[in-house]
Amino acid sequence: MFKLIRHDAALILARDPAARSKFEVYCLYPGFHALLLHRGAHGLWRRGFKFSARLVAYFARIWTGIEIHPGALIGRGVFIDHGTGLVIGETAEIGDNVTLYQGVTLGGVTLNQGKRHPTLENDVIVGAGAQVLGPIVIGRGARIGANSVVTRNVAAGDTVTGIPAHSKNAKRNDKFMAYGLPCDGDVTNGAVSHDVGLIADCHERLAVLSDEVASLRQILSALEQKQRSGG
C-alpha cells in the first residue's frame, strides 16, 4: 500500500508542474486523497462490507468533491487533476497511468445490473467535463477532449472530441497531453486545426447572412414607404 501511495505521488509530480514536492501532494491534492480513500473503500467492498464501503466513499465525496463508487476498479498511477465534480460509477474500470480532469463522468445509461460503466485502458486522458457513458471501452493511450460526450468505443491511440464525440484523425502522440488535446506549439496544426477552420467558416457564413439581412431590411423599408405614400 505504501509503495503504491509513493508511486501515485511520484506520477502526480511528473504530470503537474504546479506540484513542488511529494509532501505537498500528500497534504494538498484532493485527487490523491480521493484515490487513497477509494482504495480503502474498495477493499471493504470486496470483503462484503458494502455499507461501510459506501460510508467511506460518502465521506470522501464530502471532503474532496470527487465521487467514486467503492465498486470501481482503479489501477496504479491514476491522476485526478483538480477533480471537483468528477463521478466514477460502480462498474467502471480504469487502467494504469490514466489522467482524469474535473467534471468528468464515467457513467451508466441503463438501470440493469451488471457491467454498465466504461472501461478505460492504460494511459488514457479524459479532458474536463467529458461524459463517457455506457459499457464502452476507451482504448489504450486514447485522448478524450474536454466537454465531449462519448457513447461508443474509442480505438487505442485515437483522439475524439465533440457531441457526440468523433475522431480527430490525429497522429498518435505518446506524450502527455493536458486536457486530452495536443496544445503545444502551433495550434493550427493537428487535431485543433479542424475546429479552428470550422470557427472561421462559421464567421464567414454569419457575415454573409448579416449582409443579406441588411439588404432585405432596406427592400422592406422601401416597400413600406411606397405603400404609405400610396405609390
Image (cartoon, grey):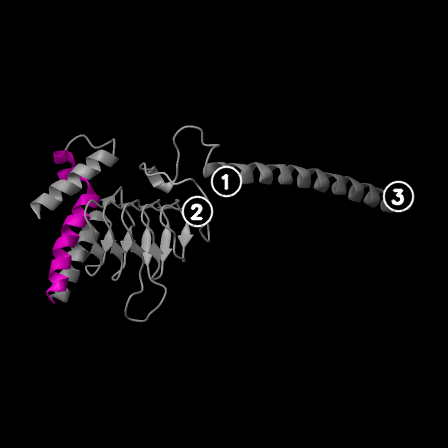
Which circle marks residue 229 in the picture?
3
The main secondary structure of the magenta stretch is: helix
- Image position, residue 154 (x, y; %): 39, 53
- Local crowd at mark 3 within 10 Å, few (<14), some, or many (≥20)? few
Residue type highlighted by circle 3:
Ser
Q: Quickly name the residue at label 2.
A: 161
Q: Label 2 is placed on what type of residue? A: Thr
Secondary structure under the numbered disc 2 in the rendered image: strand
Q: How many marks?
A: 3
Residue 186 as seen in the image, left or right of residue 66: right
Q: Crowding near pointer 2: few (<14 within 10 Å), some, many (20+)?
A: many
Q: Read off the residue under disc 1.
A: 195
- Residue 30 in magenta stretch: yes
Q: Which residues are magenta?
A: 22-48
Q: Is residue 143 magenta?
A: no
Of label 2 and label 1, which has the lower sequence position?
2
N-term-proximal mark, 2 vs 3:
2
Above or below 59: residue 181: above
